[in-house]
Image (tube, rainbow, N blue to C red):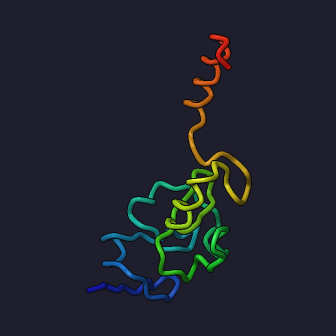
Amino acid sequence: MRTVYHCPFFNLCRLGQGLGIDFSHCMTCNYCLGIKLLDHKCREKGLEMNCPICYDFLFTSNAAVRALPYGHFMHSACFQAYACTHYICPICSKSMGDMSVSDCFFIYLRLNSIY
């Protein structure tokens, strides 16, 4: 059975147990984010846009949302599918992951004349 709670801050019902249980409302983003996303980079009204992959409106979407390190958002499922073949953000073209490991690998290859 699915549970639904009402967010009094933007007057919408969401899937989940409720604020303070599995969701928290970010006043800057103006959105209910999963408890795991409490430590995110806020962007004012950052979720009042379409997902850059499927183009569904994030603000009213029931699908789980993922926060990228620099303040962009997309559906979690869209991120998983996109990240299989892309490593840059579809919005700003910044790297979506920590490239320091691959940078070290290429430096190692260069220093050892393998690359």
Q: Residue furthest left?
A: 1
Is 80 placed left or right of 24 in the picture? right
Is 9 placed left or right of 59 in the picture? left
Q: Residue furthest top?
A: 112
Residue at the location (60% across, 36% down)? 99
x, y (%) of residue 63? 48, 76
In the rendered image, the quadrant that contains the C terminus is top right
Residue at the location (59% across, 76% down)? 58
Q: Quadrant of residue 105?
A: top right
x, y (%) of residue 98? 56, 39
Q: Does residue 34 sit above or below 41 in this rendering?
A: below
Q: Does residue 89 sit above or below 17 in this rendering?
A: above
Residue at the location (57% across, 54% down)? 83
Residue at the location (72% across, 60% down)? 91
x, y (%) of residue 74? 58, 66
Closest to the observer, 69 or 81: 81
x, y (%) of residue 59? 58, 78
Numbered disc total: 0
Closest to the observer, 4 or 62: 62
Q: Residue furthest front?
A: 114
In the rendered image, the quadrant that contains the N terminus is bottom left
Q: Quadrant of residue 108?
A: top right
Q: Does residue 6 sit above or below 93 in this rendering?
A: below
Closest to the observer, 54 or 112: 112
